[in-house]
Image (cartoon, rainbow, N blue to C red):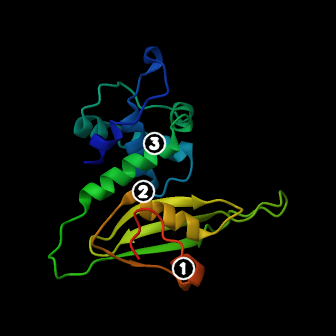
Amino acid sequence: MILTFLDDLKDHRRLQGQRYELKFIIMFSIMAFLSNAKSYRDIERYIKSHFDTLKKDFGIKSKKPPGYTTIRNILMGVDWQELEGCFRAYTQSLLTVSEPEKIIAIAMDGKVLRGSFDNFQNKRASQIVSMFETESKIILAHEVIDEKTNEIPVIQALLTDLELEGYCYTMDALHCQKKLLTQPRKGIKI
């Protein structure tokens, strides 16, 4: 279960003020987002309305659910790169070993996040690269693309970091440039 991977997260709070466990706040926030929560107040409402069930199913000892300011403070202090590492470890643990003759694809693509641009601040729209394993239908990783670059170096770094072998990678035609083929990176077989 994902909670075992969330156990590895370092808690930024002092021991004295920890009324709620970090892994449960993150897990319940994910559950709330999957139930269409869009704000900290929505997360609070979700936890409050399901608190008895969550308490019983997850063995929580708290007497009352956390307020939205507590949820906000806990989530704002989370190291997002460390959290992404937990999700990557979890998704890789879900990958199944396939038969040797079967080819499984990992689709990699960059997308612009809708509504993320700001004309007033002269800010470009945010872009993100996702890796999707097609057999298990699992998102293996996602990475933000810096404003001054494109998806090519981000995908190359992901391929090097994750070291997944035996897969067929699919990407946009953007990655079929001649100069990319003459510069192999460590860990990437061409």
**Amino acid at the residue labelled 3:** Glu
Corner quadrant of residue 144:
bottom right
Q: Which residue is mark 2?
A: 161
The kind of residue on which mark 1 rests is His
Q: Residue at x 41, y 33 (%)?
A: 22
Rendered location of residue 65, percent (x, y): 41, 32
Name the disc covering residue 82, or none.
3
Q: Secondary structure at mark 1?
A: helix
What is the spatial separation of the Cα atoms under label 1 and label 2, in whole angstroms? 18 Å
In this picture, residue 42 sits left or right of residue 4: right
Nearer the viewer's eye, disc 3 or disc 2? 2
Return the residue found at the far front. 182
Residue that protrudes farthest toward the top in the picture: 16
Mark pair 3, 2: CA separation: 14 Å
Q: Quick one: label 3 or label 2, which is nearer the N terminus?
A: 3
| Gap between marks 3 and 1 measured at Cα | 28 Å
Find residue 16 and report its horizontal and vertical position in percent.
Answer: 45, 14
Q: Which mark is residue 183?
A: none
Residue 148's spot in the image, x, y percent?
Answer: 71, 62
| Near-viewer residue (170 or 135) | 170
Residue drawn at (47%, 79%), measured in percent from left and top? Answer: 171
Vertical order, 125 against 73 (above or below): below
Relative to 90, does residue 159 appear above or below in the rendering? below
Q: Residues within 10 Å of mark 3 (few under 14, many from 20)?
A: some
Identify the residue position indicated by label 1 in the image.
175
Who's the residue at 43% across and 61% down the image?
160
Q: Nearer the viewer, mark 3 or mark 1?
A: 1
Earlier along the polypeptide chain: callout 3 or callout 1?
3
